[in-house]
Image (tube, rainbow, N blue to C red):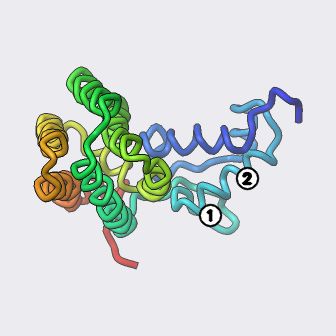
Amino acid sequence: MSATDPSARSIYGVLRQDIVSLRLKPGIRLSENDLAARFGTSRAPVREALIRLVDDGLIDVRPQRGSFVSKISLQAMERARFVREALEVAIIRRAAEQGLPAEAQALCETAMRGQIDARDNPEAFTAYDDMFHRAFAEGTALVGVWSIIEREKVQFDRVRILSLPAVTPVDVLITQHHAILQAVLNRQPAAAETAIRTHLSEVLRIADDLAHRHPELIDATAS
């Protein structure tokens, strides 16, 4: 493999985003040969990337049949939401207690403006959503905690993408972001905690509806 060939890490990143954004939908078969041709590389880094995606719960390997994009697991999504809520409550409370640096506040405000412009683009809207939440982690020196959230929330993200904008009104999410930021800026930890819990519970409200609308994409069973 030449020095210009994409690494397993970069292939993994592209495929992970393709799956999260639903450009690669559940049930699609992933061929090592086809992916190697797509990325202009050998099969070895592709195989390594696929193994990581299996570990993430994004790919199912079926003996004698190959690798397929997995369905969205509502059970895995709920686990991810639980982890995310526990960590983000801690981040938001610290931000409200210690104060939010001006740079982080500016990032939050930029993210909310971006969400207004991206209201009809679920992938861009979700990227701005991540910018908003990450700003609090950066502003409280808890970027390492955000890295944990990033690893855990992949099924959560797939549900978010699928729900926008038809099932989850974007104005609701933007209003919730305003409430979170205002509580933090007002140095009100309890109000900030309530606001972030309300925001992160929004996905629970729409999960069953999504599963009913998209049974071909979502696994609503408990394992």
* Left or right relative to 183: residue 57: right
Quarter of the rendering occupied by the N terminus: top right
Tell me the residue at 34%/29% (across/down).
Answer: 103
Q: Residues within 10 Å of mark 1 (few under 14, many from 20)?
A: some
- In percent of the image, x 62 and y 63: which residue is there? 61
Please name whichever residue, 92 or 61, is drawn nearer the observer in this view of the structure. Answer: 92
Residue wearing tag 2: 48
> Which image quarter: residue 77?
bottom left
The amino acid marked with disc number 2 is Glu
Residue 128: x and y in percent read 33, 32
Q: Is residue 213 left or right of residue 74?
A: left
| Quarter assignment of residue 35 | top right
Q: Residue furthest bottom?
A: 223
The tag earlier along the polypeptide, 1 or 2, is: 2
Residue at (23% x, 23% y) in the render: 113
Relative vertical location of residue 116 with respect to residue 33 in this rendering, above or below: above
Residue 211 screen position, x and y as percent: 26, 59
Locate residue 173: give its quadrant: top left
Q: Secondary structure at mark 1?
A: strand
Q: Is 87 left, or right, of 179 in this rendering?
A: right
How much space separates mark 1 and mark 2, taking CA atoms?
Answer: 14 Å
Q: Residue furthest right?
A: 1
**Nearest to the observer: residue 29 or residue 39:** 39
Q: Position of residue 46 (x, y in %)?
A: 73, 46
Q: Which mark is residue 61?
A: 1
Q: Amino acid at mark 1?
A: Val
Residue positioned most to the front: 98
Question: Seen in the image, is 57 located left or right of residue 7?
Answer: left
Q: Residue 201 in the image: x percent, y percent?
A: 19, 58
Q: Nearer the viewer, mark 1 or mark 2?
A: 2
Q: Looking at the image, which is closer to me, 213 or 207?
A: 207
